[in-house]
Image (cartoon, rainbow, N blue to C red):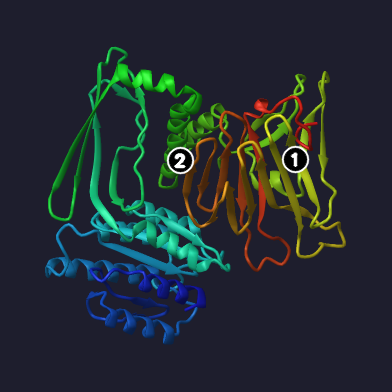
């Protein structure tokens, strides 16, 4: 067992609640049980488990199939013996740093075996360490069984990454949550059924009201608690809601519609993981259509920066181009005013150099980027550079954000908040908002001004050449003033 996996297990054991029950199954060419059944997470039991993990030695082999089936048998036995509450949120957390190479090795067969064994009764979460494993295999297996997969990076914030994951699943509050709306009144709904609802998480559903004569909007929510069934009903007077939205239009604009598009895109991308080849194409086509229509950067799209004739910056969303190929060795495409041609140029800077991207004295916005370089030059070529750090400032809003590949630091008035990339979080202030999507991107919206997106790109920690780096994009940049200047505002 690698050091990373041990640290992960120790962290999870340290975060367990005394009311939880658990056991440990270790696997390589053989499978070993720490205990013959689940035990309560008392201080004595967790201490024993930690000692077991510290002295555990495993080989490089990984029998994932048989170990997961054994874990399911443990849970089956615990429920049959009434050791666990009938409505407990039981889960299996798989930690691995290698592909299955002992026992059943075929990924598809393992996925089928595990799904048939779990039979929608438990949730499976897969934690993958490093890049020596087929992550898509773990991701599909987790999604098929009501869980998620996470790629844990071998970095200094390993503990934070694990804490962020465990905080997502440590405190289940509700099971089998379902939202129901009036028949024929609502269309194009995003997902409305959720297997679990955890403390600190949120459930968001978006759709379109297809009945324009609707006077009262009604939603019914059913769920299960640990001891009873839950039923909630919400009613909204449509005329009152419309007046509120009109009053707050300067804040929301088309926010709800864009939220619906975002949720739908994420749902389609999630569905394609388990879809057949034919279904996958339909899902990807729809996701691509929405990504282009609403100008979202997704795994199916990338962006290039252009400058049209009216001297204001725009963003063109390009389809079917990996985003990683856009951000490396920072380069831009600029449309020449009153010309039908564009020029593409690279930043020929050196590591450590600061680049002014935008300075707008009218809005108070200033954005700088700092370059980093590869660990070494390849084949005597010029050292390749990337963006490794960004600073965003708006003096009128009294805010500043510093973004590195490790953390996002927000300064607002006297307040300082540090958010690791291992966390999904949204902070809304009076005049701006910050949204972090775990290990993916950061979106900064400055009031009714421009929106900026910073994308995180991870590379293998021990990669001989490359480092983690950042990409920078603008949306609604026409809201910058004519006084704006800098690399993206020429």
Q: Nearer the viewer, residue 326 or 160?
A: 160
Badge 2: few (under 14), some or many (20 or more) residues near its Cα, within 10 Å?
A: few
Residue 244: x percent and y percent? 38, 22
Q: Nearer the viewer, residue 366 or 386?
A: 366
| Crowd rating for badge 1 (residues with CA inside 10 Å; few <14, some 14–19, many 20+) | many
Residue bearing the label numbered 1: 357
The structure residue drawn at horizontal position 62% and vertical position 63%, both measured from the top left corner, is 460
Q: CA distance from mark 1 to mark 2?
A: 30 Å
Q: Is residue 185 left or right of residue 288?
A: left
Quadrant position of the C terminus in the picture: top right
Which numbered disc, 1 or 2, marks the residue that appears first in the sequence?
2
State yes or no: discs 1 and 2 in contact (Cβ < 8 Å).
Answer: no
Q: Quadrant of residue 29?
A: bottom left
Disc 1 secondary structure class: strand
Looking at the image, is 94 positioned above or below residue 367? below
Is residue 129 shown to the viewer in this render?
yes
The spot of residue 201 in percent (x, y) is 36, 49
């Amino acid at each position: 067992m690698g050091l990373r996996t041990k640290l992960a297990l120790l962290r999870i054991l340290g975060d367990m609640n005394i009311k939880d029950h658990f056991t440990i199954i270790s696997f390589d060419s053989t499978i070993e049980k720490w205990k013959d059944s689940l035990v309560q997470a008392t201080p004595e039991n967790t201490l024993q488990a930690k000692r077991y993990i510290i002295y555990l030695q495993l080989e490089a082999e990984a029998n994932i199939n048989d170990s997961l089936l054994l874990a399911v048998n443990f849970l089956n036995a615990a429920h049959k013996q009434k050791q666990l509450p009938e409505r407990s949120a039981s889960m299996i957390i798989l930690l691995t740093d290698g592909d299955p190479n002992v026992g059943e090795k075929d990924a598809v067969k393992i996925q089928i075996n595990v799904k048939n064994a779990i039979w929608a009764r438990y949730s499976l979460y897969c934690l993958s360490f490093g890049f020596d494993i087929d992550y898509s295999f773990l991701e599909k297996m987790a999604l098929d069984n009501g869980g998620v997969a996470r790629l844990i990076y071998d970095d200094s914030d390993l503990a934070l990454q694990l804490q962020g994951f465990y905080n997502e699943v440590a405190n289940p509050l509700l099971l089998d949550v379902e939202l129901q709306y009036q028949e024929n009144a609502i269309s194009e709904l995003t997902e409305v059924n959720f297997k679990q609802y955890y403390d600190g998480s949120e459930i968001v559903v978006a759709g379109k009201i297809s009945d324009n004569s609707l006077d009262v909007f009604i939603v019914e929510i059913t769920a299960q608690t640990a001891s009873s069934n839950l039923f909630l009903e919400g009613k909204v007077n449509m005329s009152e809601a419309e007046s509120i939205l009109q009053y707050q239009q300067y804040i929301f604009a088309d926010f709800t519609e864009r939220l619906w598009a975002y949720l739908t895109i994420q749902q389609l991308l999630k569905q394609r993981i388990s879809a057949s080849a034919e279904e996958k194409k339909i899902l990807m086509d729809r996701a691509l259509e929405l990504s282009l229509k609403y100008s979202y950067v997704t795994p199916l799209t990338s962006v290039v920066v252009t400058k049209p004739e009216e001297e204001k910056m725009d963003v063109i969303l390009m389809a079917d181009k990996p985003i990683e190929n856009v951000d490396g060795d920072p380069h831009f495409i600029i449309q020449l005013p009153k010309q039908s041609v564009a020029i593409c140029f690279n930043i020929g800077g050196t590591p450590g150099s600061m680049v002014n991207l935008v300075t707008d004295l009218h809005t108070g916005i200033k954005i700088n980027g700092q370059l980093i370089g590869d660990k070494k030059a390849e084949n005597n070529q010029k050292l390749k550079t990337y963006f490794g750090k960004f600073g965003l400032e708006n003096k009128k809003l009294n805010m500043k954000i510093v973004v590195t590949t490790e953390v996002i630091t927000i300064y607002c008035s006297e307040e300082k908040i540090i958010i690791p990339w291992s966390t999904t979080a949204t902070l809304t202030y009076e005049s701006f908002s910050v949204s972090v999507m775990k290990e993916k991107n950061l979106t900064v919206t400055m009031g009714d001004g421009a929106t900026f997106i910073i994308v995180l790109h991870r590379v293998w920690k021990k990669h001989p050449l490359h480092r983690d780096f950042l990409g920078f994009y603008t949306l609604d940049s026409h809201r910058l003033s004519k006084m704006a200047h800098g690399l993206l505002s020429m």
